[in-house]
Structure formats: C-alpha cells, structure tokens
Image (tube, rainbow, N blue to C red):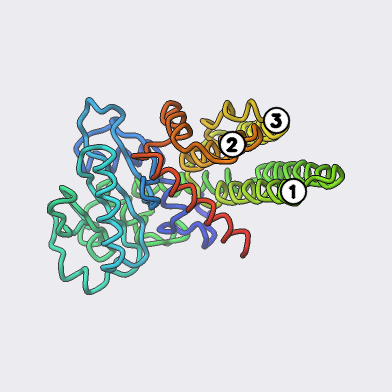
C-alpha cells in the first residue's frame, strides 16, 4: 500500500473516482452522519432527473417512512454561477420526485469563482460554506480546500474532514499526504486501490473485450443476413441503428461509472451483460417477447434500462405492423414495471428523443 500510486485519471476529486468511493456504505454513513445526523438510513438513488439532467450522486432514504430529505452530491472542478443554476434546477427536480427539499453538497475540487464566493458564508457544518438556498434546499453546502484546511489541526481527523480533504487535495499517493496515518485517510486510499485493481485487472479487460467483440460479431452477422435476404434499405438501416444503440450503451456503461467499488464481481457482471445481449438478440428474432426482456439487471443504469425498454417496445410494435408508436401504452407499461418516474407519456417521448439524439452524436464522433 505504501508504494501504491494512482494513475492521473483516477486522481481523487475526478468524477470517476469520487463517484466510486461515495457508493461505499461507510462513506455514505460519513456523509449522512454529518449532514442529517443519521446512519444506515440512506442508499444510492437514481441521479437521472425527469427533465433529462443528472446529478453526480443522489442519496435517498431507504424508506419514505423515515421522512429524510434526499442528498444531492456534486463533484465540480469549477463552481461558478452557471453551475449553481444547474444545481438549483436539479434541486427542484428532486423536490418533484421526493416531495422533500434536498440537502445539496458540492465538492469544489479546484476553483470557487468570485461571483459565488462573495455570496457564501461560513457554515456550522465543518469544512463547508453555506450558499443561499431559500425556497429550494434547506442547506446548500460548498466544500473547498481552503475551508477544509481550517479543520485539520486535530488528529485523528474528523471522518468528514478526512473525506473532503481526500477529495480536494487530489494526491495520487497516500505518502504525499501529511495525514497518511489517519485511519479514515488510510481507508480511503485502500478503497481506491481496490477499486483500481478491480477495474483494471487483466481478466476484467479480457472479459469486456470478449463481450464487445461477441456482440459486434452477432450484430454484423444479422445485418449480412438481412442483405442476403434482399431486405429493404429501411430494414437494414434499422439493424444498423440497433447496433449503434448497443455501442452507445456499452460505451456509457464503462465510462459513466454508476456502479461503485463494491460492485458485483467481474465474472458475474460479464455473465449478466451477456445474458442481456442474448435476450436482446432473441427479441429481434421473436418480437413477441421483446416487451418481456429483463431490463432490471444492474449491468446498465436506471436511465438506460428505461430507454432500452422504450426501444424494445417501439421495435415490437413495428414488427407487428403498427406504423405509429403508442406512447401512452409504453408509458403505462414502464410505470407498471417501475422503470421510470416521468410525469407523463409526453415527457417520456421527449426524453427518449434526447436519448436517440445523444446516440447519434456519439456515433458521429
């Protein structure tokens, strides 16, 4: 452990690493103990909002009976007025979903702009500034390194201070830190090293590549078969778009990092993803089963599961000869399966159109 050095792309404070460690149950408890004086009552929720925006991490109560506010966590390099407008928007979306105003925690990893700094005041919560939040959040807390350093005189460090120092100092190795003997800091670097090993193990990379290549080969074969059967250009184009959609979902799965360091083992994850691919292929061969594909697997994000369900639903209708998409039926079925929480079929349609446009942009790059 003493010689372990993180690669720069996993530096503490980066989106990838920060999101990963916050998924750890002990880290969640450090945050919730400080912000809402409770432990073991929160879990990681869906960061996708109904208007198409997303937060970095959302913690929500395990039960609505607890009446605990959601906690929105943003890890941001530069905190300026434009970013704060986005935070306010996400907070309003959180209220629409949970009927409770959220607590907002912003981890500023580099620059707190003058325009925001002049509006904050010191908070009673250690290492934090308070940003005015009347009407949209009980607390909007901003953490930055200079504020954290005001609380580092006592050893061992308060666990929340250690966590925020870890995220804002951005040290690549524990030995660079003056607080390397602190138990919370040691835990954080151990957590990071395990995450690094799990993500970049040779077998894990092999499994990912094998899965991608197998899926690509299967889809290419289907396209060639359509051409051999003299299928219409429209049918072939649909098959190509389906392949592009799978490519986008795969890319997002391995770059967006919704799963944390305690995610399921690689061999199980690969098996689940392969099973999902097989189910999707079967649905193309037999469109009558596409509405029953298990889209609740954890190999994709909640947002992706909803969009994949809509794609399958739409494809099934077209295969059955329907020329128009029944958004009301799709919306009702998705709500029944608890795949999304959009307010209406119109919102679902708009979100799906955004999803398709995002795929087109990815493919064109």
Which tag, 2 or 3, sits closer to the chain's start? 3
Residue extending farthest to the right is 228
For discs 2 and 3, the disc positioned in front in the rendered view: 2
Gap between marks 1 and 2, in whole Å? Answer: 17 Å
Q: Are marks 2 and 3 in contact (CB under 8 Å)?
A: no
Q: In this rendering, does residue 267 appear at all? A: no
Q: Quadrant of residue 179?
A: bottom left
User: Which of marks 3 and 1 precedes in the sequence?
Assistant: 1
Q: Which residue is mark 2?
A: 312
Query: SS of the residue at dot 3?
Result: helix
The reply to whether the C-beta atoms of the residues labelled 1 and 2 are less than 8 Å apart is no
Q: Which mark is residue 282?
A: 3
Based on the displayed image, in which of its 4 quarters is residue 37 positioned? top left
Give the residue at x 31% y 34%: 42
Residue 252 in the figure: left or right of residue 71: right
Residue 76 percent across, percent down from the top left: 36, 61
Q: Nearer the viewer, residue 175 or 208?
A: 208
The numbered disc on residue 236 is: 1
């Amino acid at each position: 452990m003493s010689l372990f050095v993180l690669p720069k792309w996993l530096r503490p404070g980066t989106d990838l690493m920060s999101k990963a460690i916050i998924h750890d149950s002990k880290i969640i408890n450090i945050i919730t103990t400080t912000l809402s004086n409770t432990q073991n009552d929160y879990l990681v929720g869906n960061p996708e909002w109904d208007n198409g925006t997303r937060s970095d991490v959302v913690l929500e109560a395990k039960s609505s009976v607890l009446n605990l506010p959601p906690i929105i966590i943003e890890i941001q390099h530069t905190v300026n007025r434009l970013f704060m407008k986005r935070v306010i928007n996400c907070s309003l979306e959180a209220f629409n979903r949970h009927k409770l105003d959220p607590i907002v925690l912003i981890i500023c990893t580099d620059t707190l702009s003058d325009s925001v700094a002049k509006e904050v005041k010191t908070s009673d919560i250690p290492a934090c500034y308070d940003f005015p939040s009347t009407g949209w959040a009980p607390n909007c807390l901003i953490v930055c390194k200079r504020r954290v350093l005001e609380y580092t005189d006592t050893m061992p460090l308060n666990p929340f201070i250690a966590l925020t120092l870890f995220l804002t100092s951005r040290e690549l190795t524990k030995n660079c830190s003056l607080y390397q003997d602190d138990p919370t800091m040691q835990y954080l670097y151990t957590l990071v090293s395990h995450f690094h090993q799990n993500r970049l193990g040779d077998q894990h990379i092999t499994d990912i590549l094998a899965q991608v290549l197998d899926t690509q080969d299967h889809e290419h074969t289907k396209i060639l078969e359509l051409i051999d059967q003299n299928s219409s250009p429209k049918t072939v184009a649909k098959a190509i778009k389906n392949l592009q959609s799978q490519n986008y979902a795969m890319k997002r799965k391995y770059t967006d990092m919704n799963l944390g360091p305690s995610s399921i083992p690689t061999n199980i994850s690969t098996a689940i993803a392969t099973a999902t691919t097989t189910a999707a292929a079967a649905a193309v061969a037999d469109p009558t089963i596409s509405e029953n594909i298990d889209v609740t697997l954890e190999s994709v994000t909640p947002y992706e599961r909803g969009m994949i369900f809509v794609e399958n639903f739409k494809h099934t209708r077209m295969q059955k000869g329907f020329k128009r998409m029944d958004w009301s039926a799709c919306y009702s079925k998705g709500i029944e399966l608890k795949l999304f929480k959009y307010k209406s079929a119109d919102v679902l349609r708009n979100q799906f159109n955004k999803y398709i446009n995002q795929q087109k942009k990815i493919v064109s790059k």
